Amino acid sequence: MSLSHTPINDATLTDADLLLEMLDQAHRMIVNFAHKYGFDIDDLQQEAALVMLETLPKMPAIAHPLPYLQRAIHNHLYSLLRDRGQVSLSLDVPIADDMTETFADELMQLDLVVDEAAEDAHQHALYTAMRTLDLDSQVYLREVYALNAYNPVPPYWPYRATRSNLRKNVGRRALRGLRKNDALRQAVCG
């Protein structure tokens, strides 16, 4: 996206002229960015001026510095957008203005009950089902789902060479094998 509307010779500009010319050329980009993402135009123009003042001393000696400065402004605008991000939420703040109950109080009221026996049965069924898969599939599932307690073992059936051991094909083959396992389906579904 080129903002240049008048051809100029970049090499003959002084630093002050370069800043003014770049602010003039970046104005449309700044206005569009402000409208698209809900920023104040004046704030973004000040940010652009600061970026140019910080970038000029560090900029390499190039014949056409305007595109370099334009990219620096563009990158800084998007870093502002990323940094704006989500508003942090404190657990000690009341849930509503007229309430005294906080989010921390809500978390304390939750009663988390974990059925250890059921979890162990699910894990045992999963590991048993994984042992029926080929070794590549076992290693894939262990890595992707962080099953660090599981140690892959070679299957009991003779290993046949597969056509493709690409990661996506191994993953598909592994999940297809797990879907076919009736014992795993019964353990998880009930």
Image (cartoon, rainbow, N blue to C red):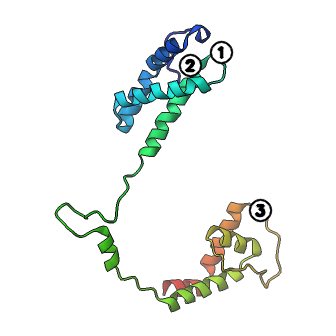
Of 183 and 11, nearer the camera is: 11
The answer to which quarter of the image holds residue 166 is bottom right
Amino acid type at mark 2: Leu
Above or below, 29 against 10 in this view is below
Check contact, mark 3 vs mark 1: CB within 8 A.
no
Amino acid type at mark 3: Ser
* Outermost residue toward the bottom in this view: 117
Which residue is disc 1 drawn over?
A: 63
* Disc marking residue 164: 3
Above or below, 27 against 111 in this view is above
Element under label 2?
helix
Is 91 placed left or right of 47 in the picture?
left
Which residue is disc 2 drawn over?
A: 66
Of 43 and 145, nearer the camera is: 43
* Disc marking residue 16: none
Above or below, 127 against 176 in this view is below
Is 3 placed left or right of 39 in the picture?
right
Dot 1: few (<14), some (14–19), or many (≥20) neighbours within 10 Å? few
